Image (cartoon, grey):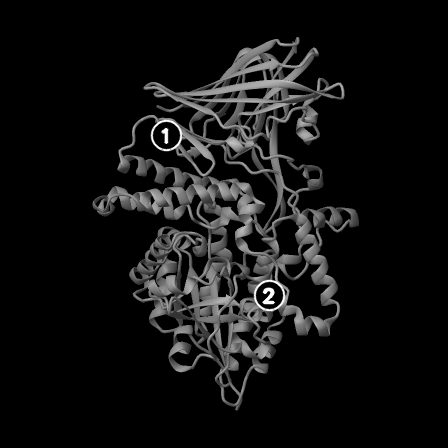
Amino acid sequence: MKTVNFCFATHNHQPIGNFDYVLEDAYKKSYLPFFELAQQYPVRFATHFSGILLGWLAKNHPEHQQLIYSMVGSGQLEIISGGYYEPILSVFPKRDGLAQIEKLSALIGQAFDTKPDGMWLAERIWEPQLPSLLYDANIKYTILDDTHFRGAGLEEDDLTGYYLTEDEGKAIAVFPISKALRYTIPFASVDETIKILQDAATEKGDNIITFADDGEKFGVWPGTFKSVYKEGWLKEFFRKLDENSSWLKTIHFSEALKTLPPKGKIYLPTGSYAEMMEWSLSTKKAILKYESFVHSFSENKEEWKEYGQFVRGGFWRNFFVKYPESDHLYKRVLGVSNRLAAVKKTLRKTEEYQTTYDHLLAAQCNDPYWHGVFGGIYLANLRHEVYSHLLAAENGLSRLEKRTILNIETKNDQITLENLSLRIIFDPLRGGAISEIDFIPKVFNLSNFINRTAEPSHDKLTSAKESGDENGKSKSIHDQVLTKEKGLENYLIYDWYQRGSFIEHFLSEDATLKDLQQMTFLEHGDFFKAHIEPQITKSKTAISLNFEYKGEVFHNNKSHSVTLKKTLELPKNSETMSVHFTITNKSASILPMRFASEWTFGLLAGDAPDRYYESPDIEIKNPKMNSTGEIKNANELSLVDEWTGMKVGLYTEKLCTFWRTPIETVSLSEEGFERVYQGSIIFVLWDFLLLPGESWDGGLEVSVKNLVK
């Protein structure tokens, strides 16, 4: 009789910072019904829980942990380890990767009384140096998409087992996940899956077919709770695995390593699953060209079948190019990791160090670093949670290092000023713009927002609107065009420069708030994109950065020389930074100026009643963070966050006009396209006239105050 071995696994993951109600919903729709049903059938399989999810389940549903414990004890279930906080292991230091794996493996041992042999790689992202890391973490195998193997030249018939690979002579096993099964389970009929397995059966019976994918696709993904449970797909699947057990053997990965030989040795190229490699292409144009090429090539089915395996997309690390916010966060985490590694060995045994290190590991959770079919980097709450842990790690590190109260650091083309309340990071390559403002007492990054970027998926949104198919559905989440609200195409506004604070603009005299709202204003100066190295002044009481640039302002179809001097001072014991500008007309013409200083803040919720604007003696009709408005002849505008307990205030020396407008992105989530509030842009504007050789002086103070002492 022909037989085949089937290794079946689920990967259950929730990112750090996800809302409790989201996890509870996933528990009720997926985690609980899946394992309760699985326990009723003699089907052996494996599962992975990220440390974040495992910790949440232990706290909120200990009965579920007991269910898993009993399934492990009976031999039905194999538990797979991984990085505790689901980092992309290949991009962080090896020391951190080992700590991530050891932390989750230790928790698995404690909770389920078992030692995991395998691990799940977050997003199946592979780089050739990983075998030595996994080996050193006592991991014997991992599971990757067949895309990785086909990219190395293997054919379909070669993907019926596992291979050995190594780095530095340290070998581990790698199992190829069947892409065909990823698309039939649980979207096609059960018989289609059984047919794929049956076709792999042989008289020798040594073939292994592997399936491993998100556990959330069994109940959480759109439409799957109905199909998987209410319509009985999963019950039928388990029943037919049992009915065909005479030739279809469900086995554990660890059992396969002990009883079946490897297919051979392999060195895999960098990669992930096919969709991820497409998403990681660094520009929208590249992705659309790639999609077009794949579509046209695959129309010739014979050629595609023969050569399609060599068509690959991008490289995951290019998300750091595609999203500067991801690169900024990544470099910040690396900086803290390197500082922690330099801490004296005697301090590493302290509780303070361990707590600090765990905050750093939490900041490596992968979800806020990329975007694909799910929200990822576009979800402000996920970025906020990662930044909170990063800032908590920095606070602990400063205590370990016994840092002074007032600090300045110049590194990686950035300048950081820091006192006990504020950490301010400047980018001289962008005119001295501020890329990050941290309110240290609240471990809150006030610059936690993301630019509005043209995504290839936006074309699907507009196409669906034009065709009237806004709520069209398909079997796979990768193809669905769903929207959470109507009219989202009206919010497809894109930023044509990298947003931040302390950015100076020279606008046309007729520029309006609507121009800012729609990002159609014209920039008449070249200061915001200039490379300006500052003069740094430090005393016992304050640090000052002084930027000076002689640039051009365009007026009446001519360029005019203008010098801009801008200074930011951070006192030693203060929650306030002081900003001053001097603008000098170096041309021979009279120049009318509409000068704006840009400040952008992310306070997480645009429509919440406990986050709002206020200005003394001025009634703001709609004070919510997602409002657009103009306040003339004012000296003060504040952003109040009662939820966090802080207030951001802007106070000007001279009367000004305040423009405010939100950053709202349109991105994909499991439930379709959605609008997400990212932050609020504030333009502080002054209108004045400069004679040849004349100068204008002005400035403002920016404070961040703790509302709860």
Question: Furthest residue to the left?
Answer: 346
- Residue 473 in sight: no
Sequence-wise, which precedes: disc 1 or disc 2?
2
Residue 112 marker: none
Residue drawn at x 34%, y 47% is 358
Which of discs 1 and 2 lies nearer the camera? The answer is: 1
Secondary structure beneath label 1: helix
Residue shown at 39%/74% (left/top)?
Answer: 254
Between 386 and 301, the one nearer to me in the picture: 301
Q: CA distance from mark 1 to mark 2?
A: 51 Å
Q: Residue placed at 51% from the left, 35% from the top? A: 604
**Residue matched to label 2:** 231
Q: Which of 650 and 313 lies nearest the eye of the viewer?
A: 313
Three-letter amino acid code at the position of disc 1: Pro
Name the residue furthest right.
467
Report the quarter where the C terminus lies. top left
Residue bearing the label numbered 1: 441
Residue 362: % across, % down: 39, 47
Residue 382, position as x, y percentages in the image: 48, 44
Left or right: residue 340 versus residue 474 is left
Q: Nearer the viewer, residue 149 or 258?
A: 149
Q: Quadrant of residue 75?
A: bottom left
Check disc 2 and give the amino acid type.
Glu
Exactly how many numbered labels are in the figure?
2
Q: Mark 2: which secondary structure?
A: loop
| Residue 650 on image: x %, y % | 51, 19
Vertical side of 428 occupied by 349: above or below: below
